[in-house]
Amino acid sequence: YECYTKTGYCFVHAIYVPVSVQMATQEKIYVPVFTAVDRDVFLRQIYPKRKPAVLRGVCLGPCVDKWTVEYLAQKGGGKEVKIHVSSVPQMNFLHKNFVYRTLSFDEFVKRTSEEKHTDFFLCEDESYYLRSLGEDVRKEPADLHKQFPELAEDFHIPNFFEPDLFFSSVFRISSRRLQLWTHYDVMDNLLAQVTGRKRVVLYSPRDALHLYLTGDKSEVLEIDSPDVNLYPEFVKAVRYECVLEPGDLLFIPALWFHNTLALQFGVGVNVFWRHLPADSYDKKDPYGNKDPVAASRALQALERALRCLDELPPEYGDFYGRRMIQRIRERTFCDCPS
Ligand code: AKG
């Protein structure tokens, strides 16, 4: 029999088992792989479930065969791109262990596909990551057709949503081993892995309380071996996992957390589109990661409410804080399984 104690040890048959052993029991679910998916199958069987799904065998166009390093360099040419550069492959947005640098697209692709570089910014085995941006980075979402028209011709966006719901199409190009922090976006997303293999780990929005969030990002970087003393709740988050093969699409519903690990040098494009009515979204959001306007209002109101509690003696503030938690629990899925 098992009993969990406040010290974080579980007592099994009179043996103390350290918390780290419990980590091995984190629930893992493989993301289902669907083949022969057309618009009808996607809209009827996959989209309404609001769960991640790998779509294998959907036609992405000639990009799957054509996008070699040489071809990308030639067609993308000398256009300047702003990239993330890091001396370690695990990028950390919260503690900014990377720098932004500018390179021509052809040079960027060439360097990103190599393991060791003769020209480099930080060190000879530095890692690179491109998340392409709009022309006016503060106002305009990325659109492959506008920034890379010649390459965009090779990539066919599946017709799984109405064209007027389209928000952005973003190049995702990464060095081998590059790992991108766990975060969520507020739009629905089809992540097309055009070349290279990529592992993606996802967590349900219902597991938000177990992910140690700062804004839209999780503080837990080492998702494969988390520090259980710092992040004891993390084990409760159910881990959804898949490995994308070249040509695969991954449907990532809005608000699902995702963490990507490039198993090979890889080129992807992700397409964001609106799930909610257009006026639900922040108009000044070129990245598609600002919370919907009603959610921002609710979060601001909560901050105001918490400041009101500061006007009370601590034990009163604590008591009314608990009553607020109770109200929020009644309104959310907090106690439901993921
Ligand atoms: C996204 O599609 O929102 C991602 O974060 C993808 C990251 C990647 O493919 O590296």
Image (cartoon, helix red, strand yellow):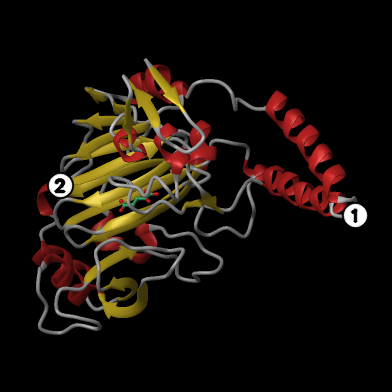
Secondary structure type for disc 1: loop
Give me the residue at 76% from left, 46% from top: 302
Secondary structure type for disc 2: helix
Q: Quadrant of the N terminus?
A: top left
Give me the residue at 37% from left, 49% from top: 227
Q: Which mark is residue 67?
A: none
In the picture of the structure, the residue carrying the numbered disc 1 is: 311
In terms of image quadrants, where is residue 2?
top left
* x then y, percent, for residue 246: 15, 43
Pick the front one: 47 or 182: 182
- The answer to whether residue 139 is left or right of residue 280 is left
Residue 59 shows in the view? yes
The label nearer to you, 1 versus 2, is: 1
Q: Name the kind of residue labelled 2 in the image.
A: Val
Up/down of 96 relative to 287, above or below: below
Extreme residue toward the top, this view: 1
Up/down of 113 relative to 36, above or below: below
In the picture of the structure, the residue carrying the numbered disc 2 is: 64
Distance from disc 1 to disc 2, alpha carbons, whole Å, reads 61 Å
Tag count: 2
* x then y, percent, for residue 19: 36, 38
Packing grade of label 2 (10 A; few <14, some 14-19, many >=20) is: some
Up/down of 30 relative to 286, above or below: above
Q: Name the kind of residue labelled 1 in the image.
A: Glu
| Residue at disc 1, CB closer than 8 Å to ligand 1 | no
In terms of image quadrants, where is residue 27?
top left
Pick the front one: 68 or 112: 112
* x then y, percent, for residue 332: 65, 27
| Residue at disc 2, CB closer than 8 Å to ligand 1 | no
